[in-house]
Image: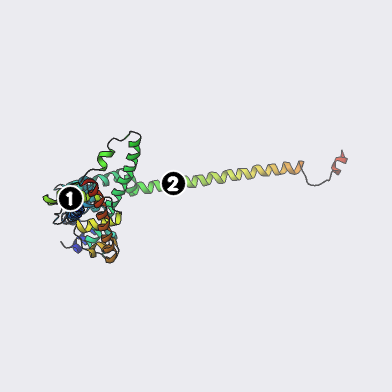
Amino acid sequence: MKTEENIEKKINQTLNSLGGLGKAEASPFFYSKLEVRMQDELTSSIGRFAFIGNLKMSMAVLGLIMILNVTSLFLLRSSEQQTTAESSDLDLISQDYFSGTDDYEYLNSY
Amino acid sequence: MSDQEIIGALQQKSETAFRTLVDQYKDRMYNTCLGLLQNPEEAEEAAQDVFIEVYKSIGKFRGDAKLSTWMYRIATTKSLERIRKQKTQKRFAFFQSLTGGDKDYETTSHATFEHPGVLLEHKEQAQTLFSTIKTLPENQRIVFTLNKVEGLPYQEIAEVLGTSVSSVESLMFRARKSLQQKLKTYYEKNFSE
């Protein structure tokens, strides 16, 4: 019985042990450390992506990408035309040799 | 500088305003993070996270809550992110310890925390209480810590968490009940006459 009472007392003391709790204070160098950290974060992001931040460079990169796209488009169309020309030749040959008609009268002229 | 003036100047990226903000709020943010994280180094980094976030997000602050409420909300979020990260790391360390990897797991998992503001006569019980608070579910832990460590009233805690006062009261009640139960188990095991 006494043990139970003592345990109850201990529990209450523990639950109330934060009574009168003072506030913890940040380090006196808190602002300096924060400043250094913010500088580091800003510098590292600027360092990696600095070229994007530069407007002239960004425009130059964009221009280059557009030129590459236009060139690719041009090359693609050229190869399509060549393929079309080749297939025209193939069509003629196939017409000569694989004509759909059963007209062989021309052989009689030989 | 008033909060309104600080907000206005911060939105113009004023360094003076930022410095004023840090001076006015650093102790509150540190104390809150320390209560939640129970580790001075982690708490300092989390408090820094708060000010970095304020700097980045001040443009989005609409002013429908007090500046302090917004900052406590950020402090709670940043601290919770670290707590969850610690739990993940602990799980990994536990598995490592099974394979004989991490020998430090046992010592760090039961490290006791001494809050610098605890009265000397309550030191031992406060250590036990803080250890037990760590085992509470997240929402009970937050509410109990914001009230008992940072001294926030229920109304302000409700605003910080975006909930009602009655929810906060309920969470506090459940937190006390959980702590009573856990402390009873602890003292029955460890307290002998």
Q: Exactly how many numbered labels are in the figure?
A: 2
- Residue A45 position, x and y percent, is 30, 45
Q: Is residue B156 left or right of residue A87?
A: left
Q: How crowded is mark 2: few (under 14 residues within 10 Å), some or many (20 or more)?
A: few
For marks 2 and 1, give the one nearer the viewer: 1
Q: Is residue A108 left or right of residue B192?
A: right
- Residue B133 position, x and y percent, is 25, 52
- Chain to which the residue tagged by mark 1 belongs: B
- At horizontal 26% and vertical 56% (from top left) the residue drawn is B142
Q: Which of B88 and B5 is in front in this view?
A: B88
As shown in the figure, which amino acid type bears the numbered disc 2?
Ile
Q: Residues within 10 Å of mark 1 (few under 14, many from 20)?
A: many
Residue B12 visible in the current orientation: no
Q: What element carries label 1?
A: helix
Q: In which quarter of the image is residue B76?
A: bottom left
- At horizontal 22% and vertical 57% (from top left) the residue drawn is B146
- Residue A102 position, x and y percent, is 83, 46
The residue beneath circle 2 is A65
- Residue B163 position, x and y percent, is 30, 64
The residue beneath circle 1 is B125
- Chain to which the residue tagged by mark 2 belongs: A
**How far is mark 2 from mark 1, CA to CA?**
67 Å
Residue B140 visible in the current orientation: yes
Q: Which of B193 and B121 is in front in this view?
A: B193
Residue at the extreme top: B100
**Labels 2 and 1 touching (C-beta < 8 A):** no
As shown in the figure, which amino acid type bears the numbered disc 1?
Gln
Q: Residue A77 carries which label?
A: none
